Amino acid sequence: MLNIHLVPCLRDNYAYLVHEPQSNAVAIVDPSDAAPIFAALKQHKLTLTHIFNTHHHWDHTGGNLDLKKETGAKITGPKLDADRIPGIDIGVAEGDTVELGRAHAQILDIPAHTKHHIAFWFGDDNAVFTGDTMFAMGCGRLFEGTPAQMWKSLNKLAALPGETRVYCGHEYTLSNGKFAVTVEPNNAGLRKRVAEVERLRADNKPTIPSTIAQERETNPFLRAASRDLRTTLGMLDASDVDVFAETRKRKDSF
């Protein structure tokens, strides 16, 4: 099994050290800043061999070049965004497989936050790295895509096995949960989860990872079929994409 270590970066980013112990291969997912990554490598006595980027934004790639210069780690990122991924060595897209020692990740194309956003899904290890497409109880803003694209991307992730752990790019869970209860107030599972998140954050503990099963139950951006959500929005007869788009619009101004 992979060993996955959360590395807090900047104000609310997470990077992830992913260690495959049999080969001692080590990847960092979405390093926004090199300094905390070097500190985490030292703490866990690991040597970096791979850098994985889900998308081009600077707060997910800012540490690429310093880490590559110091360690020689190979950088893997979205092939169709190669010109915006600093230091990229290997471009990948849906259908490709990335190896990390004896572990392997399938690449999923999940655009809309950015045009060529990808996820790394380690199916055998029940882990998916979703960058800024799916957050715990949330989703990313639509900077370079459409509601229909994001709806499709989120549902691709939601179709993964329920036990899959979701490692996302930011600690946004508490604010996401506070919004979620405003649009689906009668979701008992959601209210229970928000209470758990409030306790964790009060103790300054991370809320990540969640699981795909939790997201199906509590993430409003996956729940366009919910009558409670549709009633709140006044959209009982609207399409799922339109319900999603209105939910995202409300979150943008929450």
Image (cartoon, rainbow, N blue to C red):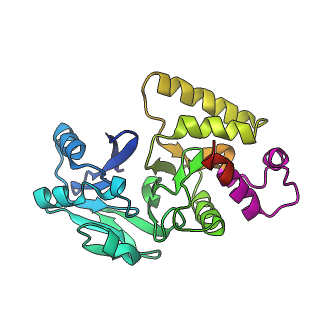
Relative depth, front residue between 23 and 42:
42
Question: What secondary structure characterizes most of the magenta part?
Answer: helix
**Residue 103 placement (x, y as % from top left):** 34, 61
Q: Is residue 192 left or right of residue 39?
A: right
Relative depth, front residue between 94 and 238:
238
Per the rendered image, the range of residues in magenta is 221-248
Residue at 20% in and 59% down:
49
**Residue 228 placement (x, y as % from top left):** 82, 44
Look at the picture and state if 185 lies above or below 124: above
Q: Quadrant of residue 225?
A: bottom right
Outermost residue, front direction?
253
Relative depth, front residue between 64 and 92:
64
Q: Is residue 165 left or right of residue 56?
A: right
**Residue 29 placement (x, y as % from top left):** 33, 55
**Residue 152 placement (x, y as % from top left):** 63, 67
The magenta stretch spans residue 237: yes
Q: Does residue 22 show up?
A: yes
Residue at 38% in and 44% down:
13
Q: Is residue 77 left or right of residue 238?
A: left
